[in-house]
Image (cartoon, rainbow, N blue to C red):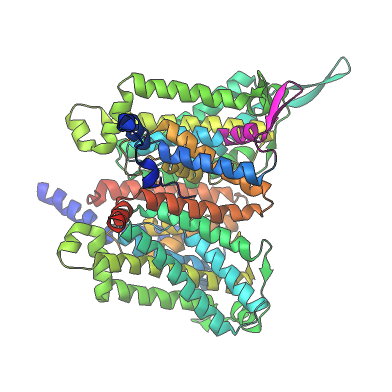
């Protein structure tokens, strides 16, 4: 009896348990959608989930690394907005080459994140308050460039926005493909490199990590730089998607990204979870929106209420069965 | 914006003055108060007639009164946030609670025009007392929810309150059916834009709550208990404190403050917007608390410091508006202020400075 209980406990306490719950939930949601609404279970609806949430997936991957390291990054939504703004300005006003624009924006994003990481580490400040200031700073910088929205009509960006890449009988957008490639790279980075192991170690116990001889400072700066890079890439994908730069883009996106990571089975205390969980988390959020859109009678605010409810269920399940929370 | 005191100034002129001077210089309120003072002095030069007060229709008018009046909701939110942060917690659902309590009050009061003997009169849908009680009741429930999640299920405070932050605005929109609810009921407006003895009524609300809270934490053991929970929750529990009850109390208190702030905001703008009421207020409140010298790591807290922090934020906003700078730039300035204040408060920075000066 007790062996059975401890077996169940070991099963539910395994790192992949909450991630598995998310996947089951996703399948169940798609199943319910397919049963309730004709046409819901088509391949293209699934692909559209990816296309519409490509930027969120990339941002959530960066956030996943930060949360695994035991931190949090509230600036990602604003950095995304700032990236769309800089992209639009460089393309439309400065007429730079698109490749140069994208590289510049990505470098700036990584620099911004890295600077925040450096402040957090050097002055031993709370990530919450530093990235909060970063959030204000990036959002404010958007308005220094322009208060109005800037429309992008640069041919390369328009092409990236409208191209449909045939895939398994449906089609994907270039943005979705980039997001999937980023996901694969991130999984490799998290599980097959020294950096990834250092992130897990720092998130699990910073002191032990330092005593093991890991460079905690470099890891932390790297993690925030990575998150900034992902947010900037998210911004580039978002400008593919929206074809505009605007200071109000991506408002509240940091909450969606955190929610996706938590729903994907990563513990906010750090050191516990999978980067791949970001995909299932983002798809669950997207599926909720698609279900509500298919229903047509439910208003958009139900999305927020359902996401809040899901967050609640997942946090409680993790707390009660995960057992490893501090 | 650097509020560090020049060491040469700090040197006492006479030995006899040493204790009082060092006492003043080491007072935790010195930095925030000095920052506010610097801002006010700057304003005196930059904004013509900044300190001018005049009486119009029996009300006191002027920039200072305006700042105080506009800072009222933030001061309320910061008051509740201080106690939460003192227990090592954080409440990021403040803005959502503001939206919820505001929409509940506005929806219940509503108000319709009735022609009585040829005179148009506005009548509330629900008695105002009931509506206000319902709004505060909803806020208390929100606080209880947060408190139980933190103390009962032992979720991390930021995650626990994230749930309400995400869902709260959705619930508020559910109440208003996605519309902005406009209130047509004169007595309700008094709360946010009325005057008592020549001063905005909202100031009396803030002052009353501040004094009650101050008495609670200074004259009873509550303040000490809260501080103990923040410094070491395990030791506090082993020493026989009911930490869970205390934690639930601070979250309920914080939400009640937020609910009251929601009433002030909806009453001031005569409508409730579930989407935008109190947007980012939680962040401003946390900022105010940090500016006031309370550490986010919990423990020692200063209610007066948080009030000054809220005033700093509002004064900064006022200055930027009156200088004719686009209001959006406000965020950049705010961010730089946070960076400076946080870094100057960190122990590492002080050590660095010490090493340089010696």
Task: Name the residue at the front extreme.
Answer: B14
Q: Residue furthest right?
A: B118
Give residue B219's position: percent from left, percent from top: 35, 19
Give the residues drawn in magenta, as a range. B49-72
Image x and y of residue B220, in percent: 33, 19
**Closer to us: A29 or B137:** B137
- Residue A270 appearing in the image: yes
Q: Position of residue A203 (x, y in %)?
A: 26, 59
Where residue B239 sits, quadrant-wise, is top left
**Picture coordinates of residue B6, whole percent (x, y):** 40, 47
What residue appears at the point 52 percent right and 43 percent down from the top-left corner? Answer: B38
Q: From the viewer's perspective, is residue A166 above or below residue B297? A: below
State the residue lying farthest toward the top.
B117
Tell whether position B109 is magenta. no
User: Residue B62 colored magenta?
Assistant: yes
Q: Nearer the viewer, residue B23 or A239?
A: B23
Quarter holding the C terminus of chain B is: bottom left
Q: Is residue B148 above or below residue B333?
A: above
For residue B58, side relative to residue A83 (left or right): right
Question: What is the tally of numbered marks visible in this picture?
Answer: 0
Front in this rendered view, residue B125 or B97: B97
* A267 displayed left or right of A231: left
Residue B276 visible (yes or no)? no
């Amino acid at each position: 009896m007790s062996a059975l209980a401890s077996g169940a406990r070991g099963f539910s306490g395994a790192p992949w348990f909450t991630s598995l719950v998310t996947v089951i939930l996703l399948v169940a949601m798609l199943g319910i959608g397919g049963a309730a609404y004709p046409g819901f279970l088509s391949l293209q609806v699934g692909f559209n989930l990816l296309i519409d949430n490509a930027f969120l997936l990339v941002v959530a991957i960066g956030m996943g690394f930060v949360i695994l390291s035991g931190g949090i990054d509230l600036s990602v939504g604003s950095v995304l907005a700032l990236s769309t703004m800089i992209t639009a300005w460089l393309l439309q006003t400065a007429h730079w080459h698109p490749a140069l624009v994208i590289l510049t924006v990505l470098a700036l994003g990584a620099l911004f994140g890295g600077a925040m990481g450096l402040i957090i580490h050097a002055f031993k400040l709370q990530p919450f308050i530093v990235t909060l200031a970063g959030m204000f700073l990036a959002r404010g910088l958007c308005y220094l460039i322009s208060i109005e929205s800037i429309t992008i009509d640069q041919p390369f960006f328009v092409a990236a926005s409208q191209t449909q890449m045939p895939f398994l009988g449906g089609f994907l957008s270039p943005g979705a493909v980039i997001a999937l490639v980023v996901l694969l790279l991130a999984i490799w980075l998290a599980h097959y490199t020294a950096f990834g192991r250092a992130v897990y170690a720092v998130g699990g116990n910073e002191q032990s990590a330092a005593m093991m001889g890991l460079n905690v400072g470099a890891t932390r700066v790297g993690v925030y730089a990575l998150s900034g890079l992902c947010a900037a890439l998210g911004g580039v994908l978002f400008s593919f998607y929206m074809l505009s730069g605007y200071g109000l883009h991506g408002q509240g996106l940091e909450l969606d990204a955190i929610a996706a990571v938590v729903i994907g089975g990563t513990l906010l205390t750090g050191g516990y979870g999978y980067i791949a969980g970001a995909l299932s988390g983002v798809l669950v959020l997207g599926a909720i929106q698609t279900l509500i859109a298919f229903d047509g009678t439910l208003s958009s605010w139900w999305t927020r209420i359902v996401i809040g409810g899901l967050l609640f269920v997942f946090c409680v399940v993790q707390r009660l069965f995960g057992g490893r929370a501090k | 914006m650097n509020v560090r005191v020049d060491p040469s100034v700090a040197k006492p002129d006479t030995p006899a003055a040493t204790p009082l001077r060092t006492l003043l210089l080491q007072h935790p309120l010195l930095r925030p108060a000095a920052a506010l003072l610097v801002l006010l002095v700057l304003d005196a030069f930059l904004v013509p007639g900044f300190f001018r007060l005049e009486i119009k229709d029996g009300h006191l008018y002027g920039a200072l009164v305006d700042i105080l009046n506009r800072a009222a909701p933030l001061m309320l939110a910061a008051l509740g946030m201080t106690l939460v942060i003192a227990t090592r917690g954080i409440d990021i659902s403040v803005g959502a609670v503001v939206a919820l309590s505001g929409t509940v009050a506005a929806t219940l009061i509503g108000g319709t025009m009735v022609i009585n003997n040829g005179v148009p009169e506005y009548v509330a849908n629900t008695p105002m007392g009931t509506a206000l009680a319902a709004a505060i009741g909803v806020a208390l429930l929100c606080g209880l929810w947060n408190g139980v999640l933190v103390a009962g299920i032992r979720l991390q405070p930021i995650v626990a309150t994230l749930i309400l932050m995400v869902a709260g605005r959705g619930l508020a929109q559910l109440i208003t059916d996605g519309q902005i609810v406009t209130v047509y009921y004169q007595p309700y407006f008094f709360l946010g834009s009325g005057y008592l003895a020549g001063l905005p009524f909202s100031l009396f609300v803030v002052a009353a709550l501040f004094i009650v809270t101050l008495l609670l934490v200074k004259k009873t053991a509550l303040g000490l208990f809260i501080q103990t929970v923040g410094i070491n929750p395990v030791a506090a529990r082993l020493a026989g404190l009911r930490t869970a009850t205390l934690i639930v109390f601070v979250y309920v208190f914080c939400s009640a403050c937020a609910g009251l702030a929601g009433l002030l905001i909806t009453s001031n703008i005569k409508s409730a917007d579930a989407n935008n009421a109190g947007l980012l207020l939680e962040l401003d409140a946390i900022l105010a608390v940090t500016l006031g010298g309370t550490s986010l790591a919990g423990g020692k807290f200063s209610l007066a410091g948080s009030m000054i922090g809220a005033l700093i934020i509002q004064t900064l906003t006022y200055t930027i508006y009156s200088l004719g700078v686009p209001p959006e730039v406000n965020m950049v300035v705010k961010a730089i202020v946070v960076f400076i204040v946080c870094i100057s408060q960190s122990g590492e920075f002080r050590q660095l400075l010490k090493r340089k000066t010696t």
